[in-house]
Structure formats: C-alpha cells, structure tokens
Image (cartoon, grey):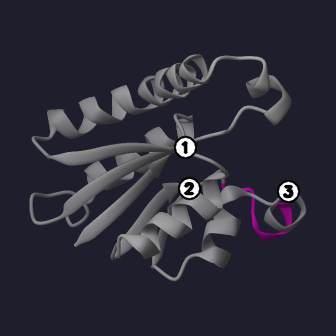
Amino acid sequence: MKILVAVDGSPFTRRMLAFLAAHDGWLGAQHSYTVLYCVAPLPHRAAAFADKPDVQALYREDAENVLKPVRAFFQRRGLTAQFAHRIGPAASTIARLAEQQRFDLVVLGTHGRGALAGLVLGSVATKVLSLCRTPVLLVR
C-alpha cells in the first residue's frame, strides 16, 4: 500500500505515529511511505522584504525541525520513507499530492474537537476529508 503520512510536528502527530507503531498492519516493509509536512507560506508582504534564498532556507529549516523526529521514528523501525515538504495550505496541499501521486491512503493526526468544532473552526482534518478522494485515516 502506498501511504501518505501528513505531519505537523504537534503532539497529535506523535499520537498518530504511536498508533501506527502499535498496529502492525499499518507499519511494515510491505508498504511504501511518504511523509509530508506543509509549511505555511510567509505573508506576501513579509516575503517581499526578504531575499528568496533566505525565505527558502527558512522553509527548509522549518520543515527539517518537524521531519527530523519522524525520520528517526521510521529509522528506529527499520522502515524506508520518502520525506517532503510543500509550501502552502495544508489541507489542499495534502489532498492534491494524494491524488497526483495516487496514494492508497492518507494518515494524519487530528485534534479531535468533534464535528461542531470542526465546522466552526475549519480544522485541517475536516478540510482534508472534504477535498480528498483518497481514503483518509484520522487518528485522535
């Protein structure tokens, strides 16, 4: 199975990874993994005052801070994964990548605030569910 693991560096990401580790069917060499972190773009006006290489370095550093512990998680389990970051809104970026690269499953952690809070607050998980044609596993 080709699995897209969306991470954000929060405790909810750690909980999602613990869930995967506790359920043998989700982790294993029989699957291929891509771990994705979506970097929030700098506001246009802020980016306009910085050199493009500096902005790109900032994005890479932010992504590496989030991806480094996830990379270690996969290495401790002897699993190979691809690691990527994209600049843009998380939900649409996740859904677009899942479709473009034909993933079989998207896995992400969620705050688990419930349906009403999701409607009011517009959580990333709710948006991914609404935008994504690929099956999504949400871990609370």
In the rendered structure, which disc, 1 or 3, sits on the residue that comes first in sequence? 1
Say which quadrant the N terminus sits in. bottom left
- Tell me how far mark 1 sits from mark 3, CA to CA: 17 Å
In the rendered structure, which disc, 2 or 1, sits on the residue that comes first in sequence? 1
Q: Which residue is mark 2?
A: 140
Secondary structure at numbered mark 1 = helix
The answer to the question of whether label 2 and label 3 lie on touching residues, with beta carbons closer than 8 A, is no
- Name the residue at 14% across, 58% down: 28
Asked whether 135 or 59 is in front, the reply is 59
Q: Position of residue 98 (x, y in %)?
A: 44, 69
Q: Position of residue 113 (x, y in %)?
A: 74, 56
Q: Position of residue 71 (x, y in %)?
A: 28, 34
Q: Is residue 80 magenta?
A: no
Q: Which residue is mark 1?
A: 12
Vertical side of 29 occupied by 40: above or below: above
The answer to the question of whether label 2 and label 1 lie on touching residues, with beta carbons closer than 8 A, is yes
- Name the residue at 51% across, 20% down: 57
- Tell me how far mark 2 sits from mark 3, CA to CA: 17 Å
- Residue range highlighted in magenta: 112-117
Q: In screen coordinates, is 80 left or right of 58?
A: left
Q: Amino acid at mark 3?
A: Leu
- Where on the picture, by quarter, is residue 85? top left
Q: Which residue is mark 3?
A: 121
Q: Residue furthest right?
A: 120
Q: Position of residue 69 (x, y in %)?
A: 35, 28
Q: Which mark is residue 81?
A: none
Q: Amino acid at mark 1?
A: Phe
- Where on the picture, by quarter, is residue 93? bottom right
Q: In screen coordinates, is 95 left or right of 92?
A: left
- Name the residue at 66% across, 39% down: 40
- Tell me how far mark 2 sits from mark 1, CA to CA: 7 Å
